[in-house]
Image: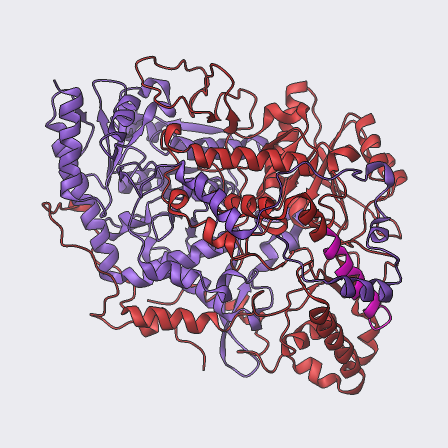
Amino acid sequence: MPEKTLFQLSSPGRQAWSLPALDVPAVDAGETARKGNDLPELSEIDVARHFTRLSIMNHHVDKGFYPLGSCTMKYNPKVNELTSRLPGFTGLHPLEPESLTQGALRLMYELGEMLKEITGFDAVTLEPAAGAHGELTGIMMVRKYFEKRGESRDVVLVPDSAHGTNPASVTLSGFKAVQIKSNERGEIDPVELERACSNCVACLMVTNPNTLGIFEPEAKRICDIMHRQGALVYLDGANLNAYVGVHRPADAGFDLMHINLHKTFSTPHGGGGPGSGPVAVTKALEPFLPRPVVRRAEGQRDGGTEGQSDRTLDPSIPRSLDPLFYLDFDRPDSIGRVMGFHGQFAVLVRAYTYIRMLGAAGLKDAAESAVLNANYVRAELDGVYDLPYKGRCLHEVVFSGTNLKQYGIKTLDVAKRLLDYGMHAPTIYFPLIVPEALMIEPTETESRESLDGFIAAMRQIADEARTNPEILRQAPITTPVRRLDEAKASRELDVCYPV
Amino acid sequence: MRFTPHTAEDRRLMLQRIGAASVKELFAGIPAGIRLDRPLDLPAPLSEPEAVRELGKLAAENTGADQLACFAGAGAYDHYVPAIVDTIISRPEFYTAYTPYQAEVSQGTLQAIYEFQSLVCRLYGMEAANASMYDCASALAEATHMARDISRRPKVLLAGSINPVHAEVVRTYAHGLNIPIDVVPLSGNTIDLDALERLCTPDVAALIIQHPNFFGNLEPARRASEIVHQAGALLVVSADPISLGVLEPPGAYDADVAVGEGQPLGIPLSFGGPYLGIMSAKKKYIRNLPGRIVARTVDTEGKTGFVLALQTREQHIRRERASSNICSNQALCALAANVYLATMGRTGIAEVARQSMAKAHYLADGIAGVRGFETETSTPFFKEFVVRTPVPAAKVVETGIKHGILAGVALDRFNPEWKNRLLVAVTEKRTRVEMDAYCVFLKQEFAN
């Protein structure tokens, strides 16, 4: 039975809220007063049961394997949920005086320092809300960097294997995205790059390891080529989970990167978010970071104002605690703010908790296990599905379902059939350079037994494709609903329950 | 502490199957010259009790609305969060799931988003909403792109009374795209309608207003809407969702795009995030909306179900021609808002708004009675108002702390000319006792 919507469950006169009676005179909103609204009316048990019933229709990491490539669906420690809900954090208003928020600012400062050590960069902003927001912030900084130098460059190069967010971020920051073709090994070809790079090019966006899970062997040379033309190199840090403690991007010559903090450093994905996308940069790009930046005071300081940057502190204001950590708004070359406040603070608390618990050895162990797991899946399924790019991978592996085409089976059918085996499907049809792609990222938290279960299911599905293809085309059959009519959804656009 | 399950035996067996001698060998693809040859210099690892203690210490260095009577607002508000909100969003079925790419095993998330969109539409009086943006500021920035794409006109008008940080974020986003921005000047604390008429030239794509505005005043929204539409431009409105319990919604005065900060809907203050960008529009503009949109449909057996719709607008399909670059959004915060609105319902949202408004007026009257303090209120206003202070507003805030009161937000942090202006917000959580204590504190400290 499908679960009714809130609106169908509503019954006039029911109430789930309670507030004390108003103890001051009521005020009339006058001519702008609203005359009623159409929100539903439910009792608390209706609300509890409704959302509980909805929830059990979801597949989720705590239930089972979630090998969604590029998404790093690792298990997230429960202690993160505890620490991020401490009242000293959740009750903190973002515009309180700094004397009251020293613990929060210290956490942000120290997290920034740890991210600098992990990536090798010189400065960091924690403000962007998600990976794509970090990309946008980074590319805006690239623009500002060239404006400051008086150079007009309007092109950003993006490999054909890149995440869709890369070219979208490029457009949104006013650059023109130009695609460069990967070579036959799926890597950026330095010769091709040399051809594409001119003094019109501001930046190259690189995902490393790339979306095939392959580390760009010429990463350093690629950076050198761009730098010789005066251009910058942006690293999409979506795949940082593959190399924490093994490699630091700044050492290869990258100029800036974003970190998908929620993925690598463990915030559950919440059904689509929130995430967090800090951007780490070299010294040369530091002046352009979004305002404000968290700083540690050394002697006298002036943090400036949010609105303008030339304030002197009023001596009549008591500075009771003389705060050690503060928000620096006085950044004349900043691209400006990218969020209403200081970023996704509760996600930062989770990342801080996670990094402090694992330490250097634990983080490296996580990267190693992630790579071990991906290679195990690669070795066990090579030959069962096509493996267009041979050789070892890092944290994820991309297969192709083209070998099942002879039975009239598409990758979509394989994905849907996996749902019947109680697992989430891999990312499908991405990267675009692999036909019928199946992009598998097991992550480090899966056990050998868990991987063996997935491998067995994938083998069985390949067998079914030969022996009983119809069951794949019909799949999924055990899920709360069967395949859904997406064409009807986009044609009729029922996006809001009618009043 | 580690969260990886492999034993030495697991590792041995797996390496054997892979055909590698060691895990290190698997990293051979990373050239030696750029491999890190030392351990990362990070603090020593912690066990769970140690981590809880460390984080507990950091949390204890803060003093927030859990300890002070919070009259701070300016975009983040201390409304009551019913217990059921955290209970529901703490279900792993919701919070450990990803974006609902495989609809058949994500119906819980998808239906919840559909309901969230529907609740937003009902609250804002609009026809279509998306699954969420990062926050109100980024939603406004995206709204400028929408307006430009829809109207094919270049310029955006920004009311001088919108949240100054939101205005800055709009400017940050507009910079690279060379979107010219004009500011509509104020007459008092609301937009000057004559100036608006002059500024509404044929190159204007949209006017952005906040209503109630940053200072808490009500804008002449109906009149502004007429002026803007006569000029063929769009009206973009930013509205506090709680205010819509008592004030007529943006749809009622013909807003084309309506956004809001969803934090007041069951989301904790949490030092500024994660919050919730609410974004809605007239249905004819649905293809210009950024972000995820869920639609109701049927499965192969005719059973009702929900899917992500209009994905061809999005970055993973359209890449450099996408309507936005957004991928991750604020799904769990949208779920919190969904549960909050389901719990408060038709009568509860109206009561929260009614109480916040009444209490704000009570406190404003009280403060106006303290010698040296004046309020910049028009009648009526909603839950926020500006107080002119006889000493720097920041000093009032600092002094209030020892009385257990977070007196508001000193506006000089946004503009040095606003040194003696204090923005005070009152939610339904504040009591008459707290508000009386606020006035006593002002009298004791500043009215002698």
Which chain comes out red in the rendered image? Answer: A
Q: Residue at x 79, y 35 (%)?
A: A252
Front residue of A293 and B120: A293
Part of the protein shown in magenta: A367-385
Q: Residue at x 46, y 25 (%)?
A: A324
Residue A368 in sight from this viewpoint: yes
Left or right for A225, reference B267: right
Residue A238 in sight from this viewpoint: no
Front residue of B101 and A75: A75
Q: Report the colour scheme.
A: by chain
Give the colour of chain B: purple
Image position, residue A315 (x, y; %) = 34, 12
- The quarter of the picture where the C terminus of chain B appears is top left
Front residue of B312 and A428: A428
Front residue of A199 and A88: A88
Image position, residue B168 (x, y; %) = 46, 30
**From this viewpoint, which residue is outermost toward the bottom?**
A467
Counting labels gives 0
Is A375 contained in the magenta span? Answer: yes
Image position, residue A229 (x, y; %) = 81, 26
SS assignment for the magenta stretch, majority: helix
Residue A448 image-quadrant placement = bottom right
Q: Is residue B39 above or below residue B194?
A: below
Residue A247 image-quadrant placement = top right
Residue B440 image-quadrant placement = top left
Is B57 contained in the magenta span? Answer: no
